[in-house]
Image (spheres, rainbow, N blue to C red):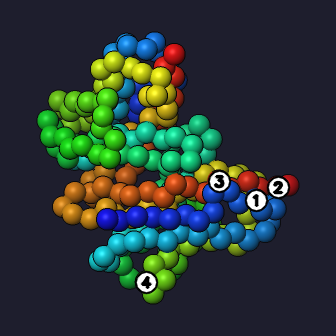
C-alpha cells in the first residue's frame, strides 16, 4: 500500500514564526503536491513538484515556498506565518494522475 | 480551464436509502475522472476512477459511478447507504497539460440519519 505521512497532525504556531510542514512518501512517486483545504473552498493547490529540486506554483503560492531535496520528501515552508494561513494542509503523491494523500496537518496560527 | 462542479454542498439521507452525488466537469478532451472520500479529520481516499472503456466503474465500499460524456457528468452512486459513509466527497478531473495535476470540486458533505 502507498503510504504518505505528514510530520504533524496538529500544529499551533505564532504569527511571524517560520513553519515547516514535512511530507514523506514511500512509493518512489515522481510527483508530489501540497494543498490547503478550507470550508466551502475545497482543495486548492499551493505547489507541486515533478522531480527532485523541480517545483511549480499552483493556484495559491503566495506566502509559501517548498523544498524537494530527496525524491521521497516534500516540504512546505511558511516563511512568516500569518493568521490567514490557519488551515488544513494536505500532501499528496502520484506517479500518474491517481493521487495518494497523507492524513493532513491542521495548522493554527495565533 | 478545467473545472468541476458539485452542485450539492450538503446531502442528508437515511441509513439504507440509495445515494447519488452529482459531479459535472468542464474539460476539452477525454477526461480522467476521480471520486475521493474524506472522513472527518482525515486525508482523502480514492473511491474510484475513470480513464477509458466501460462508462460504469466500480469502486471500493460498494460505490459506483457512471461517466456520461453527453452530459459532462460523473455521478457517484450507492444503492444502500451505511452510517459509516458519512463523510465529505470530492470529485476531480485531470487538469490537462503535461503535468499530472487534478482539479477538485468543492465537495459534498454527506450526513446519514439512523
Q: CA distance from mark 2 to mark 3?
A: 13 Å
Instruction: State the residue position of label 1.
Output: B12
From what the image shows, is residue B51 above or below residue A86?
A: below
Q: Quadrant of residue A17?
A: top left
Indicate the secondary structure of the residue bearing disc 1. strand
Looking at the rendered image, the quarter that the C terminus of chain B falls into is bottom right
Q: Nearer the viewer, mark 4 or mark 2?
A: 4
| Percent coordinates x, y for residue A78 in the rendering | 33, 24
Q: Earlier in the sequence, mark 1 or mark 4?
A: 1
Q: Earlier in the sequence, mark 4 or mark 2?
A: 4
Q: Nearer the viewer, mark 2 or mark 3?
A: 3
Indicate the secondary structure of the residue bearing disc 4. helix
Indicate the secondary structure of the residue bearing disc 2. strand
Left or right: A29 in relation to B25: left
Please state which of residues A51 and A43 is positioned toward the viewer in this rendering: A43
Q: Earlier in the sequence, mark 1 or mark 2?
A: 1
Q: CA distance from mark 1 to mark 2?
A: 7 Å
Indicate the secondary structure of the residue bearing disc 3. strand
Instruction: State the residue position of label 2.
Output: B113
| Percent coordinates x, y for residue A72 in the rendering | 26, 36
- Can you see residue A2? no
Q: CA distance from mark 1 to mark 3?
A: 8 Å
Q: Earlier in the sequence, mark 1 or mark 3?
A: 1
User: Is there one chain holding both mark 1 and mark 3?
Assistant: yes
Q: Residues within 10 Å of mark 4 (few under 14, many from 20)?
A: few
User: Is there one chain holding both mark 2 and mark 3?
Assistant: yes
Amino acid at each position: 500500500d502507498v503510504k504518505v505521512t505528514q510530520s504533524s497532525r496538529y500544529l499551533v504556531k505564532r504569527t511571524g514564526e517560520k513553519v515547516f510542514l514535512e511530507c514523506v512518501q514511500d512509493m518512489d512517486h515522481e510527483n508530489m503536491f501540497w494543498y490547503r483545504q478550507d470550508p466551502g473552498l475545497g482543495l486548492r493547490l499551493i505547489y507541486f513538484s515533478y522531480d527532485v529540486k523541480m517545483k511549480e506554483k499552483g493556484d495559491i503560492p503566495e506566502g509559501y515556498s517548498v523544498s524537494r531535496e530527496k525524491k521521497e520528501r516534500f516540504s512546505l515552508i511558511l516563511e512568516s506565518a500569518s493568521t490567514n494561513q490557519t488551515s488544513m494542509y494536505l500532501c499528496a503523491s502520484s506517479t500518474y494522475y491517481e493521487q495518494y494523500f497523507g492524513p493532513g496537518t491542521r495548522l493554527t496560527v495565533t | 480551464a478545467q473545472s468541476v462542479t458539485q452542485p450539492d454542498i450538503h446531502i442528508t439521507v437515511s441509513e439504507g436509502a440509495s445515494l447519488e452525488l452529482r459531479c459535472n466537469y468542464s474539460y476539452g478532451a477525454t477526461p480522467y475522472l476521480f471520486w475521493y472520500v474524506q472522513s472527518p479529520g482525515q486525508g482523502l481516499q480514492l473511491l474510484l476512477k475513470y480513464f477509458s472503456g466501460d462508462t460504469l466503474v466500480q469502486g471500493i465500499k460498494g460505490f459506483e459511478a457512471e461517466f456520461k460524456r453527453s452530459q459532462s457528468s460523473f455521478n457517484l452512486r450507492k444503492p444502500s447507504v451505511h452510517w459509516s459513509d458519512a463523510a465529505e466527497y470530492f470529485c476531480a478531473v485531470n487538469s490537462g497539460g503535461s503535468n499530472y495535476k487534478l482539479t477538485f470540486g468543492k465537495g459534498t458533505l454527506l450526513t446519514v440519519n439512523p
